[in-house]
Amino acid sequence: MAGSRNAFCLLTFALCLAASLLLAACGFQLRGVAALPFDSLFVQAAPASQIAVQLKRAVQSGSGTRIADRPEQAEVILQIMNELQEKQILSLSGGGRVSEYQLRYRVLFRLTDARNREHIPASEILLKRDYSFSDEQALSKEAEEALLYRDMRSDAVQQLVRRLQVAKLKS
């Protein structure tokens, strides 16, 4: 009985070791800290911009870059020029009712320095999600739509941080 238990433990250990080696061999690593190529950042956006709030939080917690309170205190200025949530009908049922929507989340931004030199020209992040709709479940579908927009905003923040990581600062 003890011999089969030892064999089971050895087999479990060997499987865990093999899985760890396979994960390491594929290049998997945890995301870690974002190394941004500047020391301070000012985020210029609309006062009620949710993406600006999330972006500031992501930069403060995930990098050594300081968020400045005023543009003149920052090495670079990230301008969130536009943030749009769009909803488009994808398909209708036989009775002419909406059965599917496509949600779009757009963020238009650019990165400049104090001398107004562009380090990232005006660029857009566009995210899309499709979802089915039913009049009988209107309340839950409304909640699903809000959740999808929140998810797209989080994805946009992550994409924006990655774009900031590869920004080339001009001397």
Image: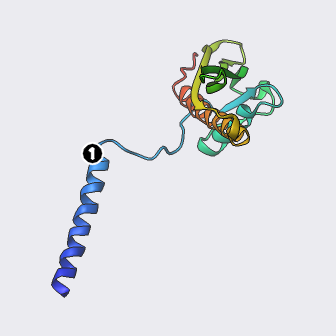
All told, the count of numbered labels is: 1
Indicate the amino acid at tag 1. Ala
Q: Residue furthest left?
A: 3
* Quarter of the image where one finds residue 6: bottom left
* Quarter of the image where one finds residue 18: bottom left
What coloring was used for the rendering?
A: rainbow
- Judge whether 44 appears above or below 143 on screen: above
- In the image, 18 versus 39, the foreground residue is 18
Quadrant of the image containing the N terminus: bottom left
Q: Relative to 1, is 92 on the left or the right? A: right
- In the image, 80 versus 90, the foreground residue is 90
Q: Residue furthest bottom?
A: 1
- Judge whether 36 appears above or below 80 on screen: below
* Quarter of the image where one finds residue 134: top right
Quadrant of the image containing the C terminus: top right
Q: Is residue 146 visible?
A: no
Q: In the structure shown, which secondary structural element does the residue marked by tag 1 occupy?
A: helix
Q: Relative to 48, is 164 on the left or the right? A: left
Q: Residue furthest front?
A: 95
- Judge whether 119 appears above or below 68 on screen: above
Q: Residue at x 71, y 13 (%)?
A: 115
Residue 36 point in image, percent of width and height? 57, 32
Residue 94 point in image, percent of width and height? 59, 22
Residue 16 point in image, percent of width and height? 28, 62
Q: Residue at x 64, y 20 (%)?
A: 89
Q: Residue at x 59, y 43 (%)?
A: 62
Q: Is residue 151 visible?
A: yes
Badge 1 is on which residue? 25
Q: Residues within 10 Å of mark 1 (few under 14, many from 20)?
A: few
Residue 11 point in image, percent of width and height? 21, 69
